[in-house]
Amino acid sequence: MGIFDIFKKKDQHDRNQSYLIEFRFSGYAKYTIMKLRHYIEKNFHLPVDKKPPHITLVGELETNDEERLVKQVVDACKQYKLVRFKLDGFDSFENRVIFVKIKASEDLESLRLDLVKRLEFCTLSKIDHDPVFTYHATLVMKDIQRKFARIWGYLQSWKIPTMNQYVLRVTILNEHRKILYEYDLILERLLNREEALDEKIFRKTMDKFNKIREVSEIEFEDVTDKEKIYVFSDPHFDHTNIIRYCNRPFVNTPHMNRKLLDNWNKTVGENDTVYFLGDMTYGRNRRPIDYWFGNLSGEIFYIRGNHDS
């Protein structure tokens, strides 16, 4: 190593580097936000945003003490287990950014404030100290000013389901916006980048999470009309692998079938109308569609899906 290489290495160590602390979505919520973002980008000819859906908790911040940064994040996260929040519709920052609103729990508020306090040795942004912090997951933010009204109108045809979400991991990103570390609140351990991206480790996280969490269900609106109309698709009865593909909160296939059937019949009355948009069942050992018709309430108008036969 030459003398200039030594000075270069020392300079890189001494200079401040930027970081972000965030939560990254997984499962159904991730799929829903990405799907909606894709439709907006496609329909309104916007640049493709490849960043995973996330909630920024702290940052952008700067420090030259990465080791201390990681330690403080870990020490803060160790105090929490099941940190809840809810998706809460849409909002915007003027006409520059459109986002999914996040309704934070007391635990999420406490976790963020604890992170900010512990990271005071860093150079923090003004937003981090804002007494009114807006928790949000960005949908679109590039080149939308002239298209804002049309995009906002399009969003009114979408509804984000109200359901409990949980902070499973807190992610530390480096200045290149790559994962540096993740702290897993469920496994109670710090993961390096390779471990954070390991699907087998994430499966362990989900398995433990499903054992300890309280059952959370979509909160359906209480509609008092005698007859109601529903639009529904893709239950995938009898499809074992769908549990893994979509992180469905079920122990096994019989458990999934039973809960889907119960939720349908608790929601849909005998005189209600259901427009079913396909994919009732799937898999080698699936039961015929007529079997499920005989067990589901309501008058069903069926449109065949690509997996139906």
Image: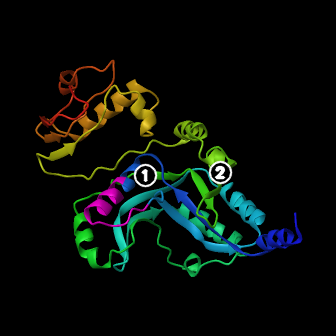
Residue carrying label 2? 193
The region drawn magenta spans: 35-49
Query: Circle 2: is it few (<14), some (14-19), or many (20+) Cα within 10 Å?
Result: some
**Mark 2, secondary structure of its residue:** helix
User: First in sequence: mark 2 or mark 1?
Assistant: 1
The quadrant holding residue 19 is bottom right
Amino acid type at image mark 1: Lys
Quadrant showing the C terminus: top left
On the picture, is 301 further left or further right than 37?
Answer: left
**Mark 1, secondary structure of its residue:** helix
Q: Residue at x 65, y 53 (%)?
A: 183
Query: How far across and how far down the image is residue 69, in percent?
Result: 72, 65
On the picture, is 275 further left or further right than 91?
Answer: left
- Residue 26 is a magenta residue: no
**Magenta stretch, main secondary structure class:** helix
- Residue 38 is a magenta residue: yes
Report the residue that reaches farthest toward the front. 2
The quadrant holding residue 275 is top left
Residue 160 seen: no
Q: Residue at x 59, y 69 (%)?
A: 58
From the image, state whether disc 2 or disc 1 is nearer to you: 2
Residue carrying label 1? 30
Quadrant showing the N terminus: bottom right
Nearer to me, 308 or 268:
308
Query: Circle 1: is it few (<14), some (14-19), or many (20+) Cα within 10 Å?
Result: some
Residue 280 seen: yes
Query: How far across and how far down the image is residue 21, in percent?
Result: 60, 64
